[in-house]
Amino acid sequence: MIERTLSIIKPDGVSRNLIGAVVTRLEQEGLKIVAMKMIRMSKEEAKGFYKVHEGKPFYESVTDFMSSGPCVVMILEGDDGIQRYRKLMGATNYKEAEEGTIRRNFATDIEKNVVHGSDSVENADYEINYFFNALEIAGR
């Protein structure tokens, strides 16, 4: 089943010039980029995006981090796109990620793990709509 998912190259990935490397990996995996832009979230925008984690111990640090610099947000599309992208990303803790995954290859700590991806169809829908309007999405 063709699914869409949100991908974010986080501030650490952008500042370390990993945009091209991540995009190459996505395309090699056969995931189609149907929308892409660079943004810089305010602290309030980051809090809105991560509202599902409000009250958790890492909420303040992740929203500080995600608003610390530019990010690249993308909509990916592909057969079983959500799970395929999650497998390509690797485990949140890069030390536990499989060899060859984006996080294993590029992350420097559990928070600065280069990429974000939606974990369900419902969250993908919310996350895509948080960053993109219909005019920005190719192939709609």
Image (cartoon, rainbow, N blue to C red):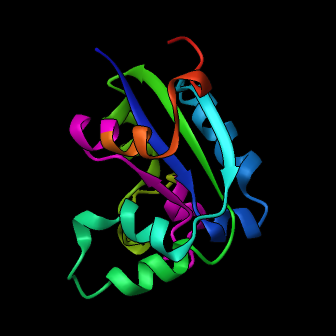
Identify which residue is drawn at 25% across, 88% down: 57
Q: Nearer the viewer, residue 14 or 37?
A: 37
Q: Nearer the viewer, residue 65 or 77?
A: 65
Identify which residue is drawn at 37% across, 44% down: 87
Q: Which residues are magenta?
A: 102-125
Rendering quarter of residue 68? bottom right
Apparent side of residue 10 relative to residue 17 in the rendered image (left or right): left
Apparent side of residue 112 relative to residue 25 in the rendered image (left or right): left
Find residue 41 and report its horizontal and vertical position in percent.
58, 65
Find residue 135 and report its horizontal and vertical position in percent.
59, 22
Question: As displayed, is residue 125 above or below residue 55?
Answer: above
Q: Nearer the viewer, residue 28 or 131?
A: 131
Quadrant in which the N terminus appears: top left
Identify which residue is drawn at 68% across, 72% down: 69
Q: Nearer the viewer, residue 1 or 75?
A: 75
Question: As displayed, is residue 122 above or below residue 10?
Answer: above
Rendering quarter of residue 95? bottom left
Apparent side of residue 124 relative to residue 111 in the rendered image (left or right): left
Find residue 13 and report its horizontal and vertical position in percent.
66, 64
Question: As displayed, is residue 135 above or below residue 131?
Answer: above
Identify which residue is drawn at 35% across, 69% down: 96
Tell me if residue 110 can be seen: no
Find residue 2 and report its horizontal and vertical position in percent.
35, 16
